[in-house]
Amino acid sequence: MKPINWFITILLYTFITLVCAYLIPSDTDLVVFSGFFGFTFVAFVPGYCFISLIFPEGKLDIAEKTVLSVALSFSIAGVSGLFLGLSPIGINLRSITYVLSSIVVILSALTMLKKMNLLQFKPRKIALKSAPKVNN
């Protein structure tokens, strides 16, 4: 998939999730869509964007990518909730959706830049110096 198409897909899914979360009333039958999109957004999308950012294409198979995405998504959501709980903003529907949506947009934009070879990660070699010898 082209990087721009991948980015648009993630943004579209984020937009659909936000629309479902804010516009579908809880007393209708359409609340199933809100639950589905909300759960998959929190449980998969942030971790998937992060995994796509840090691992090169083809490095992980689909099972590894899925498991890591779910684990990292819950970690990102948990840490976001922790920081929101400690901040004066507090945890509510609006704050957690804004924060998770922002994280997803930022990670997906960075991933798109990486896939377009505009952003490169170069590992640095760190040389450890040995401690000087002390003569007694």
Image (cartoon, rainbow, N blue to C red):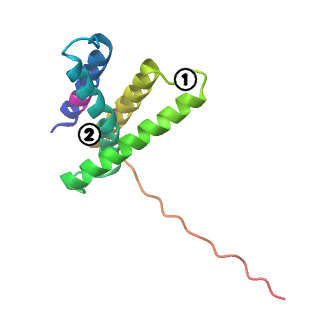
Q: Earlier in the sequence, mark 2 or mark 1?
A: 1
Q: Indicate which label's residue lies in the foreground, 2 or 1.
A: 1
- Residue 115 is drawn in which quadrant? top left
In-image side of 115 versus 99 (left or right): left
- Residue 7 is drawn in which quadrant? top left
User: Could you tell me residue 28's position as x and y percent?
Assistant: 22, 12
By secondary structure, the bulk of the magenta-drawn segment is best described as helix
Residue beneath the point at 22% across and 36% down: 3
In-image side of 31 versus 109 (left or right): left
The one nearer the camera, 102 or 83, is 83
Q: What residue did someone put label 1 on?
A: 90
Q: Can residue 18 be seen here?
A: yes
Q: Can residue 113 be seen here?
A: no
Disc 2 + disc 1, Cβ < 8 Å: no
Secondary element at tag 1: loop
User: Could you tell me residue 124's position as x and y percent?
Assistant: 47, 59
Secondary element at tag 2: loop
Residue extent of the magenta highlight: 7-11
Q: What residue did someone put label 2 on?
A: 116
**Residue with the most extreme front position:** 27
Residue beneath the point at 21% across and 29% down: 9
The one nearer the camera, 82 or 6, is 82
**Residue with the most extreme bottom position:** 136
| Distance (Cα) linking label 2 and label 1 | 37 Å
